[in-house]
């Protein structure tokens, strides 16, 4: 009788252990990847517009949003190429493109697509989800 009780307890214990392992695997699979932000430091400062007697400058702080550390790592590894694309974009802007209603949003979208293209070329995947201007100052 004691052997029977010990056997039943062992079966119940084994069943509970196996079911808790499967629950934890389901929880880990259901958990979404943690969003990561990475600030490109130092801020971008460049002149823009047509060459006139008075230079115009932009100072922009940029943050990158990725769905995991792989995207942040890719940006860190290829930061010179990423920074180059953003500087080239900002320096090619015109007064009209910055002054229009949706100008900064269009610039942000263009910067995002350029950075994703660079990362796609370097790593084989776009790696990042969004690009955010945390500050955008224009001196005219």
Image (cartoon, helix red, strand yellow):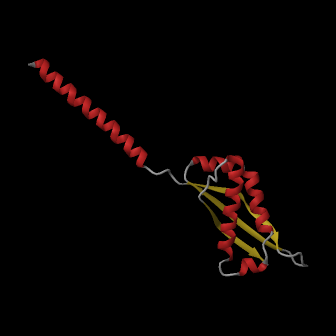
Q: Is residue 112 rendered to the left or right of residue 54?
A: left
Q: Looking at the image, which is closer to me, 87 or 136?
A: 87
Q: Is residue 117 rendered to the left or right of residue 88?
A: left
Locate the C terminus and report the quarter of the image it occupies: bottom right
Q: Looking at the image, which is closer to me, 124 or 43?
A: 124
Rendered view: 39 above or below 1: below
Q: Which percent across, then down, holds residue 128?
A: 61, 55
Q: Looking at the image, which is closer to me, 40 or 100?
A: 100
Residue in the image at 61% along x and 50% along y = 71
Residue in the image at 66% along x and 62% along y = 112
Rendered view: 72 above or below 62: above
Locate the N terminus and report the quarter of the image it occupies: top left
Residue in the image at 71% along x and 72% along y = 137
Q: Which percent across, then down, holds residue 80?
A: 76, 52
Q: Is residue 75 rendered to the left or right of residue 66?
A: right
Q: Which percent across, then down, holds residue 108?
A: 66, 68
Q: Which percent across, then down, holds residue 110?
A: 69, 67
- The answer to which image quadrant residue 58 occupies is bottom right
């Amino acid at each position: 009788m004691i052997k029977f009780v010990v056997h039943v307890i062992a079966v119940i214990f084994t069943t509970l252990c196996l079911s808790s392992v499967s629950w934890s695997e389901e929880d880990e699979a259901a958990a979404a990847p943690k969003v990561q932000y990475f600030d490109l430091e130092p801020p971008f400062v460049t002149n823009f517009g047509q060459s006139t007697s008075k230079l115009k400058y932009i100072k922009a702080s940029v943050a990158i949003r990725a769905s995991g550390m792989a995207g942040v790592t890719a940006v860190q590894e290829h930061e010179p190429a990423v920074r180059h694309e953003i500087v080239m974009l900002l320096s090619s802007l015109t007064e009209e493109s910055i002054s229009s209603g949706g100008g900064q949003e269009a610039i942000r979208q263009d910067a995002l697509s350029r950075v994703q293209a660079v990362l796609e070329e370097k790593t084989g995947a776009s790696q990042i989800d969004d690009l955010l201007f945390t500050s955008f100052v224009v001196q005219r």
